[in-house]
Amino acid sequence: MRTYSPRPSDIQRTWFVVDAQDVVLGRLATQVAHVLRGKHKPTFAPHVDTGDFVIVVNAAGVKMTGSKDVQSLSYRHSGYPGGLKSISFGRLLEERPERLVEQSVRGMLPKNTVGRQQLTKLKVYAGPDHPHAAQQPVPLPAHLSAALKTV
């Protein structure tokens, strides 16, 4: 039996929309990464980007369990010596909730060119509105969003 490798013409991409209001950040990130990678499709191959587009709305309403909002830190570096900056998850959620969700999903994708390509299909918005109505996004199906429980 030969190994299946999907061709670009075999890949069908759909647009999903996920409401992040009162959803735990880690559970949201794992489900979104699963769809971005395309693991929910029978044509999944780890070396090919077969995933779908995901729109995350209401990112400002995401929840964190425990005291992660105070204890966990997000780091970034300016590229200059001594340019390491850190910010707590709670403050990042107040100032840039889109960045918090993007960083959480990025950590669950492969660290290579395929992972960077998959991350471009993620669109995150702090509020309930998004400019992708022309793509006719559908809500994430129940079998894919079963783990997204409210707090």
Image (cartoon, helix red, strand yellow):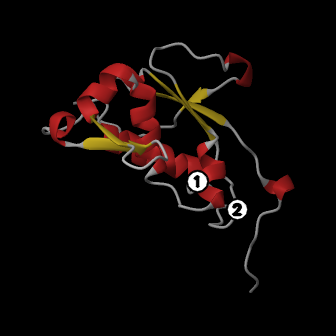
Q: Secondary structure at mark 1?
A: helix
106 and 87: which one is in front?
87
Residue linked to disc 1: 37
Farthest left residue in view: 67
> Can residue 22 be seen in this snapshot?
no
Quarter location, residue 94: top left
Q: Amino acid at mark 1?
A: Arg
Q: Quadrant of the N terminus?
A: bottom right
Quarter location, residue 17: top right
Q: Quadrant of the C terminus?
A: top left
Farthest right residue in view: 9
In the image, 2: left or right of 68? right
Provide residue 92's location: percent of width, then percent of height. 32, 29
Provide residue 114's location: percent of width, then percent of height. 65, 58
Mark 2 to mark 1 CA distance (whole Å): 9 Å
Q: Where is 150 relative to 51, above or below?
A: above
Q: Amino acid at mark 2?
A: Val
Q: Residues within 10 Å of mark 1 (few under 14, many from 20)?
A: many
Q: Are marks 2 and 1 in contact (CB under 8 Å)?
A: no
Provide residue 32's location: percent of width, then percent of height. 48, 43
x 73%, y 79%: residue: 3
Q: Where is 65 relative to 6, above or below?
A: above
x 52%, y 35%: residue: 140
> Can residue 145 be seen in this snapshot?
yes
Residue linked to disc 2: 48
Q: Where is 135 relative to 103, above or below?
A: above
Quarter location, residue 95: top left
Q: Secondary structure at mark 2?
A: loop
Provide residue 79's location: percent of width, then percent of height. 49, 47
Which label's residue is closer to the chain start, 2 or 1?
A: 1
x 65%, y 16%: residue: 131
